[in-house]
């Protein structure tokens, strides 16, 4: 990535992960119906699949000699900072496949043959801040396009406002690193990782400082001058970062807003959709509880929703 967070972690005491002490007990469905006298209807996207809140990561090859248990621990920590605020969101099992990308980090459009969401990360070595930064970004994309009934909700056509999703995902990286920095200071995945908590926080703070220094005019004025460019090229990282710096305080003040991200692609797939229409449809297609948060996000861009 950008040169931040390249302090590698030692590998002693890292190969052992706690065993799962408690497993969910699932009652036989026929017995449940017989006892209750009621059939529980499942959402369409869960028919034929087990409803799961678990975050399961299968780690592919190519990450040098980094133990897979270590990678899994970092990814779980990063994802949980967002996932814990999405209580009504589900994945189809079995989970995620993480592979080494030699290009940009990416969430594959199609699921693998085994049903897993495939995410490519471009990290070599035990640089956990980079793992967390890249993965939180891609996990946010997965929330926006692969959670729940992903085949119905994912819109593959070009979108003029894709830059906004990219900026939310940049926000997710900053949010996750700051949350992990706080958590690892007292309860890291492994005890000997506690001393690296400041590195996670520093990685995020360096990015935020970069955004502050490069913003030479009021944000509203800056955005008005840059929106057309963002609509034509969504992945301009420094511009996405500038927007993320504005969004981060909203998500940190109201982290339940991460579940609103799972509704951001419900709108009409119009290639030249105006931003105010995008926000209007996002709010209309979201639960009532999420709509005030979406209105506050729209306000960052001087858009007022009724």
Image: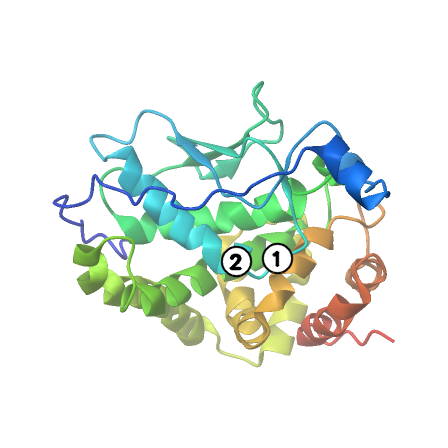
Residue 31 horizontal side relative to residue 207, left or right: right
Q: Where does label 2 land, which residue?
A: 82
Residue 275: in sight, yes or no? yes
Please tell me whether residue 210 is drawn above or below residue 108 in the rendered image: below
Say how many tags the image has: 2
Location of residue 306 in the rendering, given as x and y in whole percent from the top left corner: 87, 76
Q: Residue furthest front?
A: 35
Question: For residue 217, which quarter of the picture?
Answer: bottom right
**Mark 2 secondary-structure assignment:** helix
Q: Are marks 2 and 1 in contact (CB under 8 Å)?
A: yes
Neighbours of disc 1 within 10 Å: few (<14), some (14-19), many (20+): many
Residue in front for this viewpoint, 174 or 218:
174
Residue 21 horizontal side relative to residue 137, left or right: left
Residue in front for this viewpoint, 77 or 242:
77
Residue in front for this viewpoint, 222 or 206:
206
Q: Say how the picture is coloured.
A: rainbow
**Mark 1 secondary-structure assignment:** loop
Q: Residue furthest top?
A: 113
The residue located at (58%, 52%) in the rendering is 166
Question: For residue 269, which quarter of the picture?
Answer: top right
Location of residue 275 in the rendering, given as x and y in whole percent from the top left corner: 77, 61
Residue in front for this viewpoint, 43 or 40:
40
Location of residue 58 in the rendering, given as x and y in whole percent from the top left corner: 42, 30
Please tell me whether residue 300 is drawn above or below residue 161 in the rendered image: below
Disc number at residue 203? none
Please tell me whether residue 236 is drawn above or below residue 250 in the rendered image: above
Location of residue 53 in the rendering, given as x and y in whole percent from the top left corner: 57, 46
The residue located at (78%, 63%) in the rendering is 279
Q: Where does label 1 land, which residue?
A: 86
Residue 100: in sight, yes or no? no
Neighbours of disc 2 within 10 Å: few (<14), some (14-19), many (20+): many
The residue located at (33%, 41%) in the rendering is 19
């Amino acid at each position: 990535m950008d040169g931040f967070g390249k302090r590698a972690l030692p590998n002693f005491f890292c190969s052992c992960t706690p065993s799962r002490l408690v497993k969910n007990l699932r009652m036989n469905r026929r017995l449940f119906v017989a006892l209750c006298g009621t059939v529980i209807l499942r959402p369409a996207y869960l028919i034929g699949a087990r409803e799961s809140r678990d975050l399961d990561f299968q780690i592919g090859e190519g990450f040098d000699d980094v133990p897979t248990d270590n990678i899994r621990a970092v990814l779980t920590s990063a994802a949980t900072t967002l996932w814990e605020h999405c209580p009504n969101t589900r994945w189809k099992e079995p989970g995620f496949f993480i592979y080494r990308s030699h290009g940009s980090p990416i969430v594959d459009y199609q699921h693998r043959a085994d049903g897993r969401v495939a995410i490519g990360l471009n990290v070599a070595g035990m640089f956990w801040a980079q793992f967390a930064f890249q993965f939180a970004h891609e996990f946010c994309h997965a929330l926006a396009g692969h959670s729940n009934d992903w085949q119905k909700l994912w819109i593959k056509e070009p979108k003029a406002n894709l830059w906004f999703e990219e900026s939310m995902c940049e926000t997710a990286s900053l949010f996750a690193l700051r949350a992990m920095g706080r958590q690892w200071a007292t309860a890291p995945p492994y005890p000997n990782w506690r001393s690296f908590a400041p590195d996670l926080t520093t990685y995020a703070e360096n990015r935020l400082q970069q955004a502050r220094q490069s913003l030479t005019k009021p944000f509203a004025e800056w955005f008005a001058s840059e929106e057309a460019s963002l609509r034509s090229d969504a992945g301009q990282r420094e511009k996405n970062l500038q927007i993320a710096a504005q969004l981060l305080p909203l998500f940190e003040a109201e982290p339940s807003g991460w579940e609103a991200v799972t509704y951001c692609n419900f709108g009409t797939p119009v290639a030249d959709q105006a931003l105010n229409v995008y926000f209007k449809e996002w709010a209309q297609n979201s639960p009532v509880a999420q709509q005030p948060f979406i209105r506050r996000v729209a306000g960052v861009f001087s858009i007022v929703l009724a």
